[in-house]
Amino acid sequence: MFGKLIPWKHENRDINKQSQDHTVARMRQDFDQLWENFWEDWRNQLSQWQETRWLDSHVDFDDREKEYVLRAELPGFEPRDFDVKLSGNVLSLRAEHKEAGDGKNGEGSYRRYGSIYQSFTLPAGVLTDQIDAKYHSGVLEVRLPKSEDCQSKRIAVTAA
């Protein structure tokens, strides 16, 4: 009974020929095209995301006795690629790296691009005039000294 309503269940008929004429089959084709477009857009977004490095998964923030230390693993950059700025209590890290080859030695041409941007709200008590940033072996390290008031103090614990 329901076999007549489902176009691909008909026997001895060419499915492609019938699917072009049937409304449900056209709707299925439209859906398939929509789905394919979705995944194509997703693949494009993913490839763009892979070219851009986000610091969220590469950053360690250590609270030491006399300073905070921010470490970001960012291989492939040079120290001159970084722009570290402090605005109020917000520390911003930005880096951009562009590289292109012209195909010498039969290698073909290539382009490589990477960028990062992240900002952090600093805790109270950071001595902003003594902040130090260094980049070595693919790791950016920013040292944020604490003021005397902000440094941790050991509190003795006694038995009750």
Image: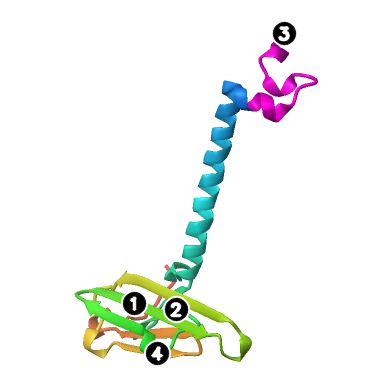
Task: Identify residue type, mark 2.
Answer: Ala
Measured in 3D between alpha carbons, the distance from the residue under mark 4 to the one under mark 1, in whole angstroms, is 12 Å
Would you name the residue on which mark 2 appears? 72
Q: In the image as oriented, which residue stretches furthest toward the top? A: 1
User: Which sits earlier in the primary sequence, circle 4 or circle 1?
Assistant: 4
Mark found first going from the N terminus, 4 or 3: 3
Frontmost of labels 3 and 2 is 3
Of residues 22 and 45, the one drawn nearer to the viewer in this rendering: 22
- Give the residue at x 41% y 74%: 115
From what the image shows, is residue 9 above or below residue 57?
A: above
- What residue is drawn where x is 71% and y is 24%? 8
In the displayed structure, would residue 88 be above or below residue 138? above
Looking at marks 3 and 1 on the same chain, the residue that comes earlier in the sequence is marked by 3
Which secondary structure lies at badge 4?
helix
Q: CA distance from mark 3 to mark 2?
A: 66 Å
Q: Nearer the viewer, mark 2 or mark 4?
A: 4
What residue would you read off at disc 1?
A: 93
How far apart in space, not on screen, are marks 3 and 1 (Cα)? 67 Å
In the drawing, does residue 48 fall left or right of residue 29?
left
